[in-house]
Image (cartoon, helix red, strand yellow):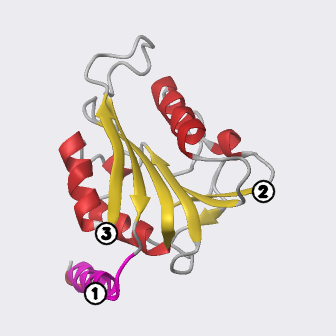
Amino acid sequence: MHNSSLEHMQRLVSTYLSTAQNLRIVDIGSYDVNGSYRQMFDKPGWHYTGVDLEAGPGVDVVLGSPYRLPFGSASVDVIVSGQAFEHIEHFWMTWLEMQRVLKRGGWVFLIAPSRGPEHRYPQDCWRFYPDGYRALAKVGACDLVEVHTDWEPHPDPGSAAWGDTVGAFRSRGMSVMQRCGLALTRLGLAMQERKA
């Protein structure tokens, strides 16, 4: 995890979250390769769960699929994800699943690269710009409260290449129609995977 990502996440946490609230926080892509957000959420009344596709440091729950989160609908207050979406083939499916588990009024803090070298873990599929985050907000029953991209290289050499795109989204809650659409999309994806 590069320094600019840690700085961006710390700013989002400080700006939008209150330590006076009890919060259930889920970190998607929490495997600690070279850094973690976990310490930012070590506060009384905050309950952090790190999820990823394989067991390892920073992972509390191993997922069977990036498209299914083992949490009830509208049960999570905050979802964070940094340096994960570029590795998810069908990131929009993960996005919709995040919206399903998020409470109305809940937050998503999303950080993903806008550029940078290929880094397959296990694949490297995407780069993101502010308009991409705007599109996610439209499909995800949420408001994009802020978005920006680090167009200029960060002074830290380990961060300079990535050009983080940073967003804070606020949930409006998924409608019944959106949940039905999610179920149909999941079904279509499952059928495609069976054919492959």
- Residue 56: horizontal and vertical position, in percent? 64, 52
| Residue at the (51%, 24%) spot, across then down | 3
Q: Nearer the viewer, residue 143 or 31?
A: 143
| Residue at the (56%, 39%) spot, across then down | 33
Q: Report the residue marked by disc 2.
A: 45
- Residue 36: horizontal and vertical position, in percent? 60, 39
Please identify the dominant SS of the magenta region. helix
Of label 2 and label 1, which has the lower sequence position?
Answer: 2
| Residue at the (38%, 16%) spot, across then down | 154
- Callout 2, which amino acid? Gly
* Mark 3 and mark 2: Cα distance apart in space: 30 Å
Crowd rating for badge 2 (residues with CA inside 10 Å; few <14, some 14–19, many 20+): few
- Tag 1–tag 3 contact (CB < 8 Å): no
Q: Report the residue marked by disc 3.
A: 93
Q: Report the residue marked by disc 1.
A: 177
- Tag 2–tag 1 contact (CB < 8 Å): no
Tag in front: 1 or 3:
1
* Mark 2 and mark 1: Cα distance apart in space: 33 Å
